Amino acid sequence: MNACSSLYVHIPFCERKCHYCDFYSLGNRDPELLDQFAAALGLEAALVARERGPAPPYRLNTVYVGGGTPTLLEPHALASALSPILSEARLEPDFEWTIEANPSSVDKAKLLAYRKLGINRVSLGIQSLAPELLARLGRIHTREIAIRALDDIFRAGFENVSVDFLCGVPGQSISTLEESIQEAQRFPIKHLSCYLLTLPPDHSMYQELPDEEEQLEHLLWVDHFLGNAGFEHYEISNFAKPGWKSRHNMNYWNGLSYLALGPSAHSFDSEKFIRSKNVSSLSGYCETLRSGRRPIEWSEELTPTQREIEKWLLALRLSEGIAEECFNTPQRRRMLDVFERQGLVVSHPVLAGRKRLTPKGFALSDQIIPSFI
């Protein structure tokens, strides 16, 4: 994967597993287990580096450490585990290194240590600042802890800071959503992600979710409010001040190669159109690596049909949209006409010859995009 430009690292530990989360993670912060994982992560990084042999070094422009709660892993352990790759990589001048954090998992001293490693972007999972909603979501932090974490992040010298919020939460109103986001904006955040809470039908809170009309109202309010605050709605769930998009995630959405380490992590080779996935088991991950093998559960070469589907899925989630020439079948042209009349798709106001989703189209993208595929 010589053209790889991004590295993702999955840290599968949380202080407590949130009931709505479907990412692979464990509600366990046992120091011995963390040490075992860090050792295995170092073995995976070393195997990847060794398999590449004398190939030119990775030219990395982004690293993203996600989870789970990555900040449960001590900075020195993270640095040691990734050194087989990062010590040999060519880091671009505008290199972006993100770490996700939960408010209760960071303090100024730890943040300074991460910054010393070269981490220059923090993504903080706040979700809400309303105490009653934090309780419903099962979050272990309070409003006060979240605000203190934001203060510590900026006092530690981070400038590129993103925060995550949820909307469409049972019991949430526009006023509680507004109060949370306004409070976060007292800090000079550059990026904000707002995700719609989605739950499987067998979840105990599923029947309490707001109906589609109320969910749409929440999403459109966030778009309007953040637009007035100077944020660009550049992806379905993501907003950024000019020049502060998540470059790592943009690499995903632009179909570039990425290498991923850690249990359940996915890698993609954009030259060979090969995607692979690591095992979603901490014990299986560690045991496989201790035996000297990569912990890959499966690998597949995308078919032309899969590549066409992904082209639509990725392009229409971005504000740049997709070229008009891609609407090249009677069905696609017919659906384009329908969605334009409904105000869900428009011609791009700046980029000639492109179509993109409107804010309402973003909110209804799960219904729109399959119509073109």
Image (cartoon, helix red, strand yellow):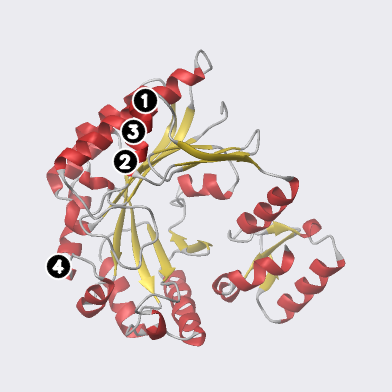
- The amino acid pointed to by label 3 is Glu
The C terminus sits in image quarter: bottom right
Mark identifier at residue 283: 2
The Cα atoms of the two marked residues, 4 and 1, are separated by 46 Å
Work out whether mark 1 precedes mark 2 in sequence or the reverse, and give the earlier one.
2
Dots 4, 3 in contact, CB < 8 A: no
**Residues at circles 3 and 1 in contact by the CB criterion of under 8 Å:** yes
Q: Write down the residue under mark 4.
A: 144
Cα distance between the residues tagged 2 and 4: 36 Å
- Displayed quadrant of residue 36: top left
C-alpha distance separating marks 3 and 1? 6 Å
- Say the numbered circle drawn on residue 55: none
**C-alpha gap between disc 4 and disc 3:** 41 Å
Q: Amino acid at mark 2?
A: Ser
Query: Which of pointers 4 and 3 indicates the residue nearer the eye?
Result: 3
The answer for how far apart the CA atoms under marks 1 and 2 are is 12 Å
Q: Secondary structure at mark 1?
A: loop
Where residue 305 appears, as percent x and y from the top left, is 74, 51
Q: Is residue 315 left or right of residue 223?
A: right
Hey, what amino acid is under mark 4?
A: Glu
Which element carries disc 3, helix, strand or loop? Answer: helix
Extreme residue in the right direction: 330
* Picture quadrant of residue 35: top left
Q: Report the amino acid beneath label 1.
A: Ser
Q: Position of residue 57 (x, y in %)?
A: 48, 20
Marks 2 and 4, the one that precedes in the sequence: 4
Let me know if residue 89 appears in the view: no
